Image (tube, rainbow, N blue to C red):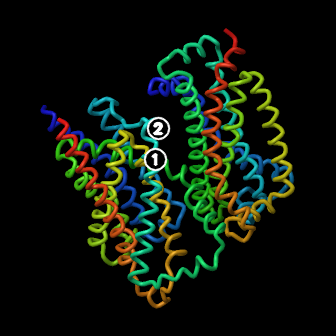
Amino acid sequence: MTGLAYKEFKQNQGFLLLTLILPVLIAYPVCAWFLHSAQTAAGGATVMELIRQEQMGEFWLMFLVGAFLAVGLFQGMIFSADAKKVWAMWAAASPEGVKGYVRSKYLLTFAMSMIGMLSLQTGDFLMEIICAANDAGWFGMANFIPLFFYLQIILRAVDIPLTLRFGLKNGSLVKSIAMIVIGIAVMVIVSNFGEELVDLYEKATEQQLGTAVNLMLGLLPVIALALYWLSYQISCKVYMKGAEQYDK
Amino acid sequence: MTNKKQTLLRLGLFLLIAFSLTWIPHFICLHIFGYEDWLTSAFGVIVTLTMYAPMLGNILTRLITKEGFRDLKLRFRLKGSLRYYAIPFLTEFFIMLMIVIIINCTHGNWKFEALAEASLPDVISELLLMLMMPLFYIALPCFGEEFGWRGYLNPKLEQLTGTCGAVIIGGIIWGLWHAPLVAAGYNFGTGHPALSVLLMCISCVFVNAVLFWLTKKTDSVFPAVLLHSIMDLNLQTFAIQYFTGGISEETIKKITALQGGLLGMVIPYAIIGTVFFILLLRQRTKKKIGN
């Protein structure tokens, strides 16, 4: 397992670095630049003034989702280097076997989600410091980040077995389409109902909403982890079938 | 150089790095902001960042002394040791149970009014939200601590002083590492800095027993990371909110932070730590008999 973990690390160093750096850039500086550009074009307030007046909060949320989508993209790319029949046969014949190889992919995917979460939480702290220095109160994305982390785990639990079974190209196509659809849906929902969503989440965390929603939020991490484990079991079973579709 | 001298040198370097990367930022922030203002400001994140100091101590010591990177205890060991990942949850459950018993025996009346008023799904969801939502985020800085203390310090101390020494001395060192914050009011309030640091060291000795037992049983720091993370989530507030009752406003005002820390932290940790300390000693005896 150590060997496999080392191999995954060496093979995907670039993606790991991108997972550490890119989410925080997308969620905060890129969003700030977007708001600045939009406001400048409309002759409006500066980004810090918008934050002080607690306006356009939904855009920060939208870019946060974008950051998680970027992490998802990198997580998909870690399967590309090994999408060869020869490698699949070698992995199956190795002492760790198919289970060990698949486990290393799942652990790396989970680690990338955690690195993305760390990156975004760090960005959130920095934003708090920058806003405090400019006499503004930061919106605070800290409550959303773990939520999106667990949602990402659920998404990975669904798409990794599909990728391993139907091949990288078909799996990537399905995932790209799904990501575009989800991205557009999120943009539309957040743009039109952003404030309501924030209110909804605040009420849920203050337990003013229905019991069912609270319970779902509480169970989400447990469900995510259980699905991830189940996904691993399924992937172990379908890996060799999928490997038959790989190129030599 | 003998093995013992080399181990001492490495320990010294590790402690220098771990302590300086923590104490210096802590003292600077305490001097600039003061305790309350610092922790409530955005710069409170520095407390989280200094949790990575022991990890850096481990890595830098190995690099500088050319020790190499063997025996990092970074394997998950899920096969055959999965039950040890359940022990952190059980341990926290017993800690919460002891806090409930202690507080109800000393100040409460065993009537759980808050629990009676709330619905069971609401209570369960609150517990799950408190436990699971931040778990994997807080696990990262806790890994920073555990990779240093249980992953490096304790094994080195065990080579020099045996298992007992590793638990006691390791716990005291860990407690002293918290000293600037604790003396300023963390966990035990203000007014008794020396006593607070002493109580912190005592708590850390007992928690060290639990964490070291988990690390030795699995040869991995990850179960200890999980337990440390769960403990840092401060689920005791949940237990106190729902499972203690009859504590008057007057009593709440009278209970000092020091007493709260003693009842809610030191005593439960001492009880559970003693159990695991005995288990560690039994394990050591079994190994000696086996040899």
Picture quarter containing residue B120?
Answer: bottom right
> Which amino acid lies under the numbered mark 1 shown in the image of this protein?
Tyr
Residue A98 appears left or right of A175: left
How many residues crowd mark 2 within 10 Å: few (<14), some (14–19), many (20+)? few
**Residue nearest the observer in this picture, B190 or A7:** A7
Residue B283 coordinates in the image, percent (x, y): 25, 46
Q: Nearer the viewer, residue B246 or B13?
A: B246
The subunit letter for the residue under badge 2 reads B
Which residue is rendered at x = 35% and y = 39% of the image? B219
Image-based side of A183 in relation to B240, left or right:
right
The answer to whether B185 is drawn above or below residue A1 in the figure is below
Q: Secondary structure at mark 1?
A: helix
One can see residue A240 in this view: yes
Q: Mark 1 near mark 2, Cβ–Cβ under 8 Å?
A: yes
Quadrant of the snapshot with the N terminus of chain B? top left
Which residue in the structure is indicated by mark 2?
B78
> Could you tell me how far apart the alpha carbons at marks 1 and 2 are, in whole angstroms?
8 Å
Q: Which of the two residues, B77 or B53, is positioned nearer the viewer here? A: B77
Q: Which residue is mark 1?
A: B85
Q: Quadrant of the C terminus of chain B?
A: top left
Q: Position of residue A27 (x, y in %)?
A: 68, 46
Give the amino acid at mark 2.
Leu
Residue A203 lies left or right of residue B172; in this view the side is right
